[in-house]
């Protein structure tokens, strides 16, 4: 069919109008850029589902999300905050949050805490979210740390119950090793996995008050109490209770030792449970890190994850809308379940997941306090050097004194104490 000139003009005009209408709809939508650190496909999927729900509830906001592996994210975050910044980032509470708040790189969220009722819903994590009396973080979830273990392997070698004391733990390791099963998997290439061992040995040997003084730079690394942490750790290494060449594996590469039954235990946060294969999950148990000194009040690591608005964010209005959405009890619960963790929102329902339930009980019943985690409780530079020292120690446990002497020089330089 041949169109007449007027028909052609009309068709072109209608097409142009249609394009104009579609682009007008796009122009009306604002863009919100969000950067999310994740570990594993399951964590990424949880955040994507939350963002999908947010866009459905707020059709006028187009979320552009970037998912970055957690280790790369830690390196890149300072650059984002000081140059071209996203509108929302996820991060950690405690000293890690304060580090950026102190430098004016995180926006003050105190008004949002009051306006959205977070003072009540997030009362337990308010202090960790604050710097100089103001709140710079919106808590999302937190999690317990403890020992995951293969129940079938424990049963196979005659370990009757979960170890509660250090003697029972060492006996369990001895039985596993004798049966040809490596007792403990660890991914030391990710230095923070080693920091979990330092934290718990220090908390169990010296207590949380000492631990926090050390984190604040108030105690020398050459102190005999710090050396005791390393000598206790060295005994585990000398006895061959960790997987061989542990510094060659990151967390993702170390977990298959557990999944395949080549190793029996792993000290880790409950957040990894969401990624367990279905056939393995039923064999997994979880228990509190054993007591070493009964006279030391029991403390735990309970790190809090957060959302933050960078000071240089361009779309702070929609960023605040996004935070208000995510901080609701329902979304908080959904994220926590997906992460194998606990919602920071006190109005979210308690978890049904068995591991999360145990973690909830561990954190609820602790008498000695809750730490944020080694690299979140102290200034970044010292934490980075401390974790490098841990890797050097694991590579050659005979170098304890050299490692601690170097860390002491670093402490003096950083803290001027």
Image: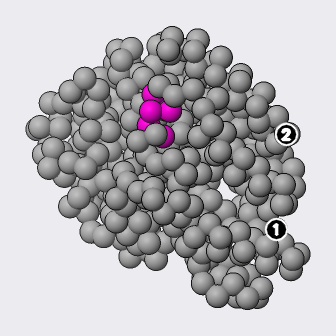
Q: Is residue 345 magenta?
A: no
Q: Residue 403, how many percent across, how many down?
A: 74, 29
Residue range highlighted in magenta: 211-216
- SS of the residue at dot 2? helix
Name the residue at 71% across, 69% down.
170
The answer to whether residue 192 is left or right of residue 344 is right
Number of the label disc, if any, that sits on residue 135? none
Residue occupied by mark 1: 182
Q: Residue 152, how many percent across, how many down?
A: 70, 85
Which residue occupies the foreground of this view, 247 or 112? Answer: 247
The answer to whether residue 213 is left or right of residue 292 is left
Q: Residue 64, how many percent across, how many down?
A: 45, 35
The answer to whether residue 53 is left or right of residue 414 is left
Q: Earlier in the sequence, mark 1 or mark 2?
A: 1
Name the residue at 39% across, 14% down.
103
Q: Which of the two marks, 1 or 2, is nearer to us in this view?
A: 2
Count of marks placed on residues: 2
**Label 1 neighbour load within 10 Å: few <14, some 14-19, many 20+:** many
Image quadrant assignment for residue 282? bottom right
Residue occupied by mark 2: 398
Q: Is residue 205 above or below residue 184?
A: above
């Amino acid at each position: 069919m041949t169109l007449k000139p007027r028909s052609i003009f009309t068709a072109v005009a209608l097409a142009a109008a249609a394009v104009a209408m579609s682009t007008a709809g796009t122009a009306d939508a604002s863009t919100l850029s969000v950067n999310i650190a994740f570990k594993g496909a399951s964590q990424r999927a949880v955040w994507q589902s939350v963002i999908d729900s947010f866009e459905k509830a707020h059709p006028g906001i187009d979320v552009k999300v970037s998912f970055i592996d957690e280790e790369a994210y830690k390196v890149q975050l300072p650059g984002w905050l000081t140059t071209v910044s996203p509108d929302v980032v996820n991060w950690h509470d405690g000293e890690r949050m304060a580090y950026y708040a102190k430098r004016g790189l995180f926006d003050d969220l105190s008004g949002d805490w009051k306006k959205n009722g977070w003072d009540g819903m997030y009362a337990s994590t308010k202090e960790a979210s604050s710097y100089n009396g103001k709140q710079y973080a919106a808590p999302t979830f937190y999690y317990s740390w403890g020992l995951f273990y293969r129940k079938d392997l424990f049963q196979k070698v005659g370990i009757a119950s979960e170890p509660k004391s250090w003697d029972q733990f060492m006996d369990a390791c001895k039985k596993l090793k004798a049966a040809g099963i490596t007792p403990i998997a660890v991914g030391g290439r990710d230095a923070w996995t080693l920091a979990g061992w330092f934290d718990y040995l220090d908390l169990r040997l010296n207590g949380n008050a000492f631990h926090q003084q050390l984190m604040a730079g108030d105690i020398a690394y050459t102190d005999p109490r710090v050396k005791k942490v390393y000598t206790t750790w060295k005994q585990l290494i000398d006895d061959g209770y960790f997987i061989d060449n542990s510094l060659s594996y990151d967390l993702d590469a170390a977990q298959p030792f557990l999944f395949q039954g080549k190793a029996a235990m792993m000290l880790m946060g409950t957040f990894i449970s969401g990624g367990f294969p279905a056939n393995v999950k039923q064999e997994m148990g979880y228990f509190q890190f054993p007591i070493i000194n009964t006279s030391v009040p029991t403390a735990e690591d309970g790190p809090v994850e957060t959302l933050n608005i960078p000071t240089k964010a361009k779309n702070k209005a929609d960023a605040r809308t996004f935070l208000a959405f995510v901080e609701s009890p329902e979304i908080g619960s959904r994220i926590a379940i997906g992460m194998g963790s606990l919602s920071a929102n006190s109005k979210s329902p308690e978890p049904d997941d068995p591991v999360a339930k145990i973690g909830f009980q561990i954190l609820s019943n602790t008498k000695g306090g809750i730490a944020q985690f080694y690299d979140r409780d102290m200034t970044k530079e010292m934490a980075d050097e401390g974790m490098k020292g841990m890797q050097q120690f694991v590579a050659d446990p005979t170098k304890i004194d050299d490692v601690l002497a170097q860390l002491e020089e670093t402490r003096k330089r950083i803290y001027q104490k």
